[in-house]
Image (spheres, grey):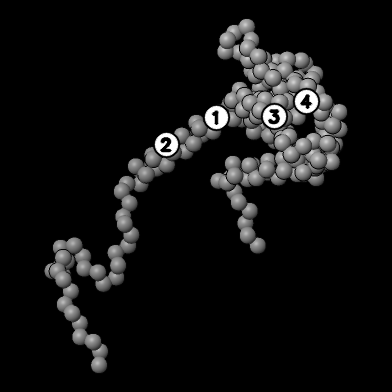
């Protein structure tokens, strides 16, 4: 029986988990009346805009708990599918996001999807020894206190300090029978040995 992968594959396994969750959710969309182009990440944006009205990308990012960049990328994808419209805000750098008629027509299906997904996620978490949503919240809080890049930098520094303490590493043990430096044989070509009869 193989040992499960450890923390060195944390990012890879988290992406795999997210792919599984999103893929299975998207597979349910046709039965809910949602087309192939709709993505699971769109639903929270639609819900925020439906509940609170037009919002800037920064406001959306705050409501969703994601970075400004992630919210901007999602909104751009939704705009290409005519789910939202973008208009300039009071500040030229600020863009206001509004639900487009197409997204508004999907609201009943999205409400059914949200209710079903919430129920399924609650049942899924009940099978786990520790709620995944709570663990994610704690992980995000820990990374906010000390980002991963700082943790990696400290580990690199610690490894460098350890190498300095240990001194230069040897290439490996001397091969048995190999001439030592300074011996008469060192650097001399080996004489041909006669083959055994």
Q: What element does badge 4 sit on?
A: helix
Q: Which residue is mark 4?
A: 102
Pick whichever of labels 1 and 3 is earlier in the sequence: 3
Q: Which residue is mark 3?
A: 81
Q: Gap in Å between the C-alphas at discs 1 and 4? A: 39 Å
State the quadrant of the N terminus: bottom right
Residue in view at x 77 percent, y 44 percent: 27
In the displayed structure, 1 sits above or below 69; it is below
Mark 1 or mark 3: which is in front? 3
State the quadrant of the C terminus: bottom left
Q: Position of residue 113 (x, y in %)?
A: 83, 34
Q: Nearer the viewer, residue 158 or 192?
A: 192
Pick whichever of labels 3 and 4 is earlier in the sequence: 3
Mark 3 or mark 2: which is in front? 3
Pick whichever of labels 3 and 2 is earlier in the sequence: 3
Q: Position of residue 50 (x, y in %)?
A: 79, 20
Q: Position of residue 120 (x, y in %)?
A: 83, 40
Q: Gap in Å between the C-alphas at discs 2 and 1? A: 16 Å
Q: Which residue is mark 1?
A: 147
Q: Which residue is mark 2?
A: 157
Residue in view at x 62 percent, y 28 percent: 73
Q: Gap in Å between the C-alphas at discs 1 and 3? A: 34 Å
Mark 4 or mark 2: which is in front? 4
Q: Position of residue 191 (x, y in %)?
A: 16, 77
Q: What element does badge 2 sit on?
A: helix
């Amino acid at each position: 029986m193989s040992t499960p992968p450890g923390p060195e594959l944390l990012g890879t396994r988290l992406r795999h988990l997210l792919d599984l969750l999103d893929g299975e959710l998207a597979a349910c969309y046709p039965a809910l009346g949602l087309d192939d182009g709709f993505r699971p990440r769109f639903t929270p944006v639609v819900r925020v805009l439906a509940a609170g009205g037009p919002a800037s990308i920064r406001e959306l990012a705050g409501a969703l708990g994601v970075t400004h960049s992630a919210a901007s990328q999602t909104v751009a994808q939704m705009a290409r599918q005519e789910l939202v419209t973008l208009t300039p805000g009071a500040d030229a750098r600020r863009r206001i996001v509004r639900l487009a008629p197409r997204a508004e027509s999907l609201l009943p299906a999205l409400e059914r999807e949200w209710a079903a997904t919430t129920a399924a996620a609650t049942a899924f978490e009940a099978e786990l020894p520790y709620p995944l949503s709570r663990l994610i919240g704690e992980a995000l809080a820990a990374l906010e206190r000390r980002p991963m890049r700082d943790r990696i930098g400290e580990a690199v520094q610690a490894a460098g300090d350890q190498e300095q303490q240990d001194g230069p590493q040897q290439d490996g043990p001397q091969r048995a029978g190999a001439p030592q430096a300074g011996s008469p044989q060192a650097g001399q070509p080996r004489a041909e040995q006669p083959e055994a009869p």
